[in-house]
Image (spheres, rainbow, N blue to C red):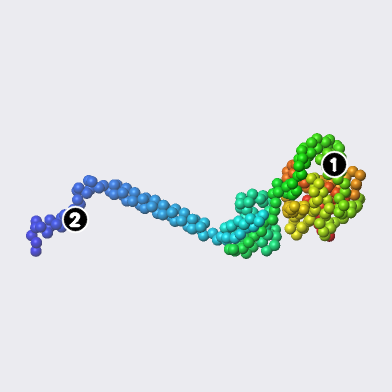
Amino acid sequence: MAEEGSAVDAEDKLETEPDPCRSKCCPETFVEKETENTNEKSKEDFSVEEKEKDTTEEEHASSSRETASFRVVWNKKNYEVTFPVDETVDSLKQHIEKLTGLPVSMQKLMYKGLVKDGGKTLRELNVSNGVKMMVVGSTINDVMKVTPPPPGALKDDKSGTSGSSKEPLSKQKMHKKVLDKGKPDDVMPGFKNKKEKLPNVPIAGMYNKYGGKVRLTFKLELDQVWIGTKERTEKVPMGSIKNVVSEPIEGHDEYHMLAIQLGPTEASRYWIYWVPAQYVDAIKDTILGKWQPF
C-alpha cells in the first residue's frame, strides 16, 4: 500500500487536477472559435472541390460531343468539315457560309437528294464520317457575270439609264440597242393574250442585255432556275430572287422583255429579251412561289 504523499499520489493528482496554464492560455471560447474556423475551412475546401468537379464534368461533356468528319463540295472545291451530329442543317449552312462566302439563302444542300428540312439534325440524316455533301448555289456577282459584256457595253448602259421613266422600256437606249438586233431566228413562238404553264423543255432562243443568247431552265424539284448561255450556266435558288418584272415589246406584243432581280436593288436585275408572252405569268408565279404545276 502506497504511503500518503508518495510519488504515485503525486501522479494521480496531476492527472485529475486541471492544468492552470491551459485554462489561462486556452479558454473555451478560443477553442470553440478554432473549431469553427476549421469547419468553415473544410466547407470552403469542399465547395472548391465541387466547383472543380462540375467544371471538369462540363468540359468532359463538351469535349465528348459526337462529331462527324465529311467532305463538302461547292464550285468544284472541296472543304473538309468536322461538325457535331446533333446540330441542325441550318447550323451547318451557317458554317458553310463562313467557309465559302456563299450566303445561306443561296445554298441548296444535296445529301441523298435535296435536303429541304433545315431543322433536321445531321444524326437524323445519318451523316457519318467520310460522306460527301454537295452544295449548289451561286453568288449574285456570279450570276451577273453569266456573260461578260462586250467592249463599250458598260458605257452604253450608263448613258442609257437617263431615259424617262414614263418612256416604254423597249424605247430606252439600254434596251433598244438589244431589241434593234431583231427577233432571234431560233426564238420560241410567242402568243399574246394567252397563258400557258411552263414547257417541259428550256425556254430558249432569247437575248440577254449584252446581246448574247440565253435560255431559262426551271428545276422545280431543286427549287432553282438555271440561267444558261453558251459560256456557262448559273443555278439560282428561286427563294433568293427578290422580284420579276416584265413589259411587252412595243410592236411585238407576243413577246416580253423580262427582268429577274437577284439582289435588293434594281441594279441587280438580269434582263432577258424576246420571252414568249404566254409563259410570262407562269415564270413570275413559279419563281415567286404562287404557281403550282398542273
Left or right of 18 on screen, residue 213: right
Q: Nearer the viewer, residue 252 or 66?
A: 252
Residue 161, above or below 196: above
- Check the picture and name the quadrant holding the N terminus: bottom left
Residue under the point 81% across and 46% down: 211
CA separation in Å, label 2 and label 1: 123 Å
Amino acid at the residue labelled 1: Lys
Q: Residues within 10 Å of mark 1 (few under 14, many from 20)?
A: some
x and y, in percent, of residue 201 in the image: 82, 59
What residue sits right under mark 1 in the picture? 176
Where is mark 2, residue-wise? 16
Say the numbered circle drawn on residue 27. none
On the question of residue 259 being in view, the answer is no
**Residue 80 at x, y percent in the picture:** 59, 57
Q: Quadrant of residue 174?
A: top right
Label 1: element kind = helix
Decide if residue 62 is on the left or right side of residue 284.
Answer: left
Residue at left offset 81%, top offset 51%: 213
